[in-house]
């Protein structure tokens, strides 16, 4: 029998927060818990923390400490499933009609969630709403830097958001709220991918013209550390696979040309990343893939030769 603080309240929450954790530094978990103090209260808002097979002792200790907190449930996957699987599993544990995903190393800007929820209540046609995010490194930003939102915050609809999403990732976990029915309608996060599973879901929403944006910072995104959910996969073609899948998908026919050039840029990026750590063979392979996708670019074919002989790629 779980402790009283872990038994679901008889009151059905209106918002469920879902956070995947895999060997996340304990200090990050504590910082996020502090930021959600008073928000996830076990009444109107619940917080589901999904342990995706953590083995780091400090992480496990931090998760155990959350077990006694009102409004928080720590659940564990039967096996490590990556960020997509962990988030989908967390959703199945939730009870609210609105979902908010935030990674364990990031922080919501104080007051942002309340403002976004008020905007959604005033605009019932909106089923997905994102704000902006601000990067930080090191010390947690002071609450004095939070923007005073108020009534001036307005929602914009982006019917052409899919084209921009191909070129740049202007969304982040922790910067948006999504209606549960909409999340389920697009199949949630695609567990076939370890990196880019969120981008692919956003694209599926974008081509349905479901994306709305409010121009205010809602998330502090922590930088300066390696992702605990993806790790060394950032050196592999795992980062390209969602784009390759999207290019084959008929619903993204209008974005095929943009997707092709994004694929070229990602292969170029992988070539440089692998060259920087001395992996000449992999750098050459990715440079070759970039050249094949760009078709007639002499510079890309020259980069294949440069990578093969160890000359620096620009």
Image (spheres, grey):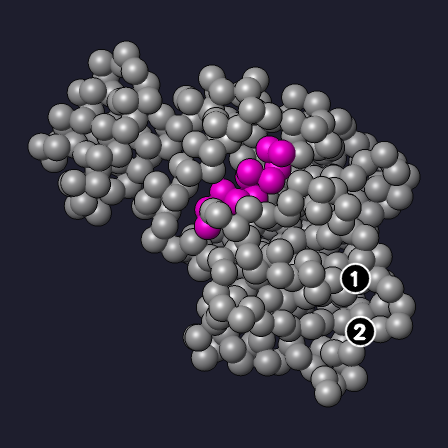
Q: Nearer the viewer, residue 127 or 27?
A: 127
Q: Is residue 196 magenta?
A: yes
Instruction: Name the residue beneath numbered marker 1.
Output: 95
Left or right of 4 in this view: 136: left
Q: Which of 182 and 248 is in front in this view?
A: 248
Q: Quote the CA–CA distance across marks 2 and 1.
A: 9 Å
Residue 198, percent from left and from top: 56, 44
At x 50%, y 74%, the residue is: 59
Query: Helix or strand or loop: what does disc 1 sit on?
Result: loop
SS at circle 2:
loop
Q: For residue 8, which numbered disc appears in the image?
A: 2
Tell me, yes or no, whether the highlighted magenta stretch contains residue 63.
no
Tell me what residue is drawn at x 60 percent, y 57 percent.
87
29 left or right of 185 in image: left
Whether the residues at callouts 2 and 1 have beta carbons within 8 Å, the answer is: yes
Work out which quarter of the rendered image holds the N terminus and state it. bottom right
Tell which circle, 2 or 1, labels the residue nearer the N-terminal end. 2
Instruction: Count residues near mark 2 (Cα–Cα under 10 Å), then give few for <14, some for 14-19, many for 20+.
Output: some
The magenta stretch is 194-204
In terms of secondary structure, what is the magenta stretch mainly? helix
């Amino acid at each position: 029998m779980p402790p009283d603080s872990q038994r679901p309240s008889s009151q059905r929450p209106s918002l469920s927060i879902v956070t995947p954790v895999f060997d996340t530094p304990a200090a990050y978990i504590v910082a996020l818990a502090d930021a959600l103090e008073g928000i996830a209260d076990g009444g109107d808002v619940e917080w589901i923390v999904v342990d995706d097979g953590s083995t780091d002792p400090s992480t496990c200790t931090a998760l155990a400490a959350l077990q006694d907190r009102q409004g928080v449930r720590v659940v564990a996957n039967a096996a490590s499933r990556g960020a997509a699987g962990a988030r989908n599993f967390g959703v199945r544990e939730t009870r609210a009609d609105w979902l908010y995903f935030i990674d364990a190393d990031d922080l919501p800007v104080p007051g942002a969630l309340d403002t976004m929820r008020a905007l959604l209540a005033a605009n019932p046609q909106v089923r997905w709403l994102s704000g902006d995010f601000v990067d930080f490194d090191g010390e947690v930003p002071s609450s004095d830097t939070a923007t005073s939102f108020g009534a001036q915050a307005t929602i914009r609809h982006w019917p052409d958001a899919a084209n921009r999403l191909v070129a740049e990732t202007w969304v982040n976990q922790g910067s948006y709220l999504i209606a549960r029915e909409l999340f389920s309608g697009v199949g949630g996060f695609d567990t076939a991918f370890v990196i880019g599973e969120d981008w692919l879901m956003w694209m599926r929403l974008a081509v349905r013209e479901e994306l709305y944006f409010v121009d205010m910072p809602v998330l502090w995104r922590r930088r300066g550390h390696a992702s605990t959910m993806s790790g060394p996969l950032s050196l592999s073609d795992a980062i390209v696979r969602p784009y390759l899948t999207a290019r084959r998908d008929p619903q993204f026919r209008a974005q095929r040309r943009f997707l092709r050039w994004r694929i070229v840029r990602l292969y170029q990026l992988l070539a440089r990343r692998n060259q920087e750590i001395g992996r000449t063979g992999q750098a050459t392979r990715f440079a070759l893939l970039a050249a094949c996708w760009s078709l007639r670019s002499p510079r890309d074919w020259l980069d294949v030769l440069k990578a093969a002989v160890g000359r620096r790629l620009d």
